[in-house]
């Protein structure tokens, strides 16, 4: 709706699957009809680009791709999913630092907003019930140190386990399915948490579990 020009580089998901999921999110239900599909696809014209490649991508190719999208397509946002598909070894910290530095420099030079998805280290105790912080990002500390913003997305796996055991557990239903935490914001004041509930039919996250999920108004 804001007419941003966005590139999604999903190195673990085929573009057709990405579009299928986004079509459900747009329509607000699991089986969008032909009109809803066509409306969403028309809306994505000159707004959304998908990089048609599944598998690893080198640091240099990833940086070149971002610059190409900015220069040729006048792009404004790039989502790189994920760090581990570009910097494939957790031990090569210098490569991760070089990539992080390159992304920051490119963003500063071009005005491009670059969103890089990373993963957190598994907790030593094996207990994933605790909300992680930016200091637990897997790999080099330069990833979070150099980023202007760090947003942590935490899935409430204990809730899923409780509901699998007892689908009528109302206390578990009341728990959020996920928490999004702004853990660093270099040029802004707000840092905090947002609780979200997942709607399986639309694949959307909502800020409460009772409000109806409605189609997006695209035009």
Image (tube, rainbow, N blue to C red):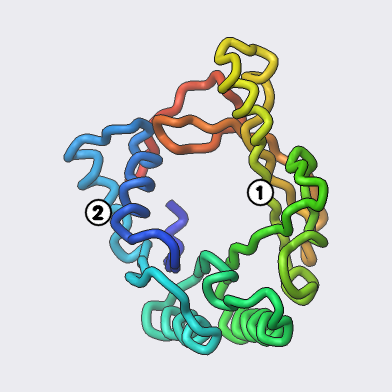
Residue at image coords 73%, 42% = 128
Instruction: Kindly identify the residue that appears in the image at 60 percent across and 26 percent down.
Output: 208
Specify few, some or many for label 1: CA neighbours under 10 Å numbering under 14, 14-19, or 20 or more. some
Residue at 42% x, 72% y is: 55
Above or below: residue 195 compared with residue 212: below
Count neighbours of disc 2 (C-alpha within 10 A) and say few if under 14, some if 14 to 19, many if 20 or more. Answer: few
Q: Position of residue 136 (x, y in %)?
A: 79, 59
Q: Residue furthest front?
A: 125
Residue at the image point whose x is 80% and y is 54% from the top: 133
Question: Is 2 situated left or right of 152 in this image?
Answer: left
Snapshot quadrant of residue 198 = top right
Q: Is residue 144 visible?
A: yes
**Figure disc tally:** 2
Task: Indicate whether 22 appears above or below 65.
Answer: above
Where is residue 194 drawn, in percent x and y?
A: 70, 39
Distance from label 2 to label 1 (Cα)?
Answer: 30 Å
| Secondary structure state at the residue bearing disc 1 | strand
According to the picture, the residue beneath numbered tag 1 turns out to be 153
Q: Nearer the viewer, mark 2 or mark 1?
A: 1
Q: Return the x and y of residue 76 as percentages of the image width and height.
A: 49, 71
Q: Is residue 199 left or right of residue 191?
A: left
What is the x, y in percent for residue 170? 64, 12
In the image, 83: left or right of 23? Answer: right
Depth check: give the residue in front, 122 or 181.
122
Q: Quadrant of residue 27?
A: top left
Q: Secondary structure at mark 2?
A: helix
| Residue placed most toward the observer, 195 or 53 | 53
Task: Name the residue carrying label 2.
Answer: 42
Is residue 190 in view? no
Q: Is the Cβ of the residue at disc 2 closer than 8 Å to that at disc 1?
A: no
Dot 2 or dot 1, earlier in sequence? 2
């Amino acid at each position: 709706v804001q007419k941003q020009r966005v590139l999604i580089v999903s190195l673990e998901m085929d573009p057709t699957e990405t579009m299928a999921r986004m079509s459900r999110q747009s329509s607000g239900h699991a089986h969008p009809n032909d009109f809803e599909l066509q409306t969403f696809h028309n809306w994505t014209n000159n707004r959304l680009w998908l990089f048609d490649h599944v598998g690893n991508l080198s640091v240099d190719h990833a940086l070149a791709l971002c610059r190409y999208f900015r220069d040729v397509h006048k792009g404004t946002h790039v989502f790189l999913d994920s760090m581990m598909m570009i910097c494939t070894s957790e031990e090569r910290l210098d490569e991760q630092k070089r990539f992080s530095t390159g992304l920051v420099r490119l963003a500063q030079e071009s005005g491009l907003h670059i969103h890089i998805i990373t993963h957190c280290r598994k907790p030593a105790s094996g207990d994933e019930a605790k909300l992680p912080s930016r200091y637990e990002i897997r790999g080099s500390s330069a990833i979070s140190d150099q980023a202007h913003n760090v947003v942590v997305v935490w899935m409430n796996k204990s809730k899923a386990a409780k509901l699998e055991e007892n689908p009528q557990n109302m206390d578990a239903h009341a728990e959020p399915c996920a928490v999004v935490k702004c853990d660093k914001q270099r040029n802004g004041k707000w840092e905090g948490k947002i609780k979200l509930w997942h709607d399986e039919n639309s694949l959307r996250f909502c800020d409460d579990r009772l409000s109806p999920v409605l189609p997006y108004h695209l035009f």
